[in-house]
Image: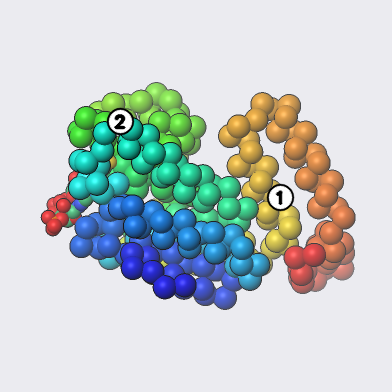
């Protein structure tokens, strides 16, 4: 796959997607969103890819938001389409069926913070900065921030971030549960790959069902979620990986999962 605004590589079973507009701090214009849609559709359909890592090119930014040049031209008709299109791309990532790790390597503002939130979890470099500065522009988050941030941290903290437009550093993002761990900038991608490879080493049917249940928990009541969990748990016991995993434990050896 060839792209203008995205770098894409496959490292064994791990896809690495880099937003590549470093001179514009990787701001998301329409062309980049279209390419994100294409690259993640490709990842979804490629059975040889088990996990994806999303990051930004350059040392300064993950994504510094939606492209303000394009925002500036919106009216209330085109803005609805703009918001729904971006939400659709981010929903594709959240519902990819494979884990997507955000490796946040700098500014993750506005649409950048929302993009990181659409990933299944986030790690960050020490120089990462997060925020929803839309109120500074006279708008509100439009790519899912009002919903996902409130669910990921808590609604009080989300409200403060969204209402003040305040930027927080990686340490604060860690304290409030927005990122799982903070690393030195030059270690971030190695750590992301290490985490991805741990996931790759597991039974992939179990990984995908577990992810499905966790993602579904955002939209289900506890009883609906537990029901789904029981059904998916039951399905995993019909796999070769289940027999292999339990037998390997009992035989005191490493399992060799086949994703079957
Ligand atoms: N949309 C379009 N262009 C953007 C952008 C965005 N969201 N964020 C940064 N850029 C561009 C700048 O216009 C500048 O382009 P130029 O060199 O052609 O003038 C370039 O990226 C570098 O940004 P600059 O502002 O010079 O870097 P900085 O280090 O001084 O500041 C930020 C970094 C992130 C604080 C600042 O760029 C910023 O506030 N960006 C907007 C963040 C935002 O509001 N995002 C939410 C949008 S909904």
Seen at 41% across and 56% down, the residue is 34
Q: Distance between the residues labelled 1 and 2?
A: 39 Å
Q: Position of residue 52 (x, y in %)?
A: 52, 62
Coloring scheme of the render? rainbow
Rendered-image quadrant of the C terminus? bottom right
- Tell me the quarter of the picture where residue 169 sits: top left
Among numbered discs 1 and 2, the one appearing first in the sequence: 2
Seen at 20% across and 47% down, the residue is 69
Q: Evaluate whether residue 156 shows in this view.
A: yes
Q: Is residue 145 left or right of residue 44?
A: left
Q: Is residue 65 left or right of residue 237?
A: left
Q: Evaluate whether residue 188 shows in this view.
A: no
Q: Name the residue under label 2.
A: 76
Up the image or down, 145 lies above or below 101; here it is above
The single residue placed furthest to the bottom in the displayed view is 12
Q: Dot 2 lies on which element?
A: helix
Q: Name the residue under label 1.
A: 209
Q: Position of residue 71 (x, y in %)?
A: 25, 42
Up the image or down, 105 lies above or below 221; here it is below
Give the mark toward the camera: 1 or 2: 2
């Amino acid at each position: 796959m060839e792209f203008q605004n995205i770098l894409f590589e496959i490292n064994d079973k791990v896809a690495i997607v880099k937003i590549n507009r470093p001179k514009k701090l990787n701001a998301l214009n329409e062309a980049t969103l279209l390419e994100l849609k294409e690259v993640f559709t490709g990842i979804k359909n490629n059975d040889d890819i088990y996990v994806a890592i999303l990051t930004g090119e350059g040392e300064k930014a993950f994504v510094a938001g939606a492209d303000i040049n394009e925002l500036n031209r919106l009216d209330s008709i085109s803005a609805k389409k703009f918001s729904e299109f971006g939400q659709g791309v981010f929903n594709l990532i959240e519902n990819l069926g494979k884990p997507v790790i955000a490796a946040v390597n700098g500014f993750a503002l506005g649409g950048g913070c929302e993009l990181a939130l659409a990933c299944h979890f986030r790690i960050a470099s020490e120089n990462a900065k997060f925020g929803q500065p839309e109120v500074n522009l006279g708008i509100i988050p439009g790519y899912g921030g009002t919903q996902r941030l409130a669910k990921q941290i808590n609604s009080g903290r989300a409200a403060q971030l969204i209402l003040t437009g305040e930027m927080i550093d990686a340490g604060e993002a860690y304290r409030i549960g927005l990122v799982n761990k903070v690393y030195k900038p030059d270690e971030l991608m190695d750590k992301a790959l290490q985490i991805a490879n741990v996931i790759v080493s597991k039974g992939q049917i179990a990984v995908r069902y577990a992810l499905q249940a966790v993602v579904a928990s955002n939209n289900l009541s506890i009883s609906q979620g537990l029901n789904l969990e029981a059904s998916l748990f039951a399905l995993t016991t019909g796999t070769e990986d289940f027999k292999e995993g339990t037998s390997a434990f009992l035989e005191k050896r490493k399992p060799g999962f086949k994703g079957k």
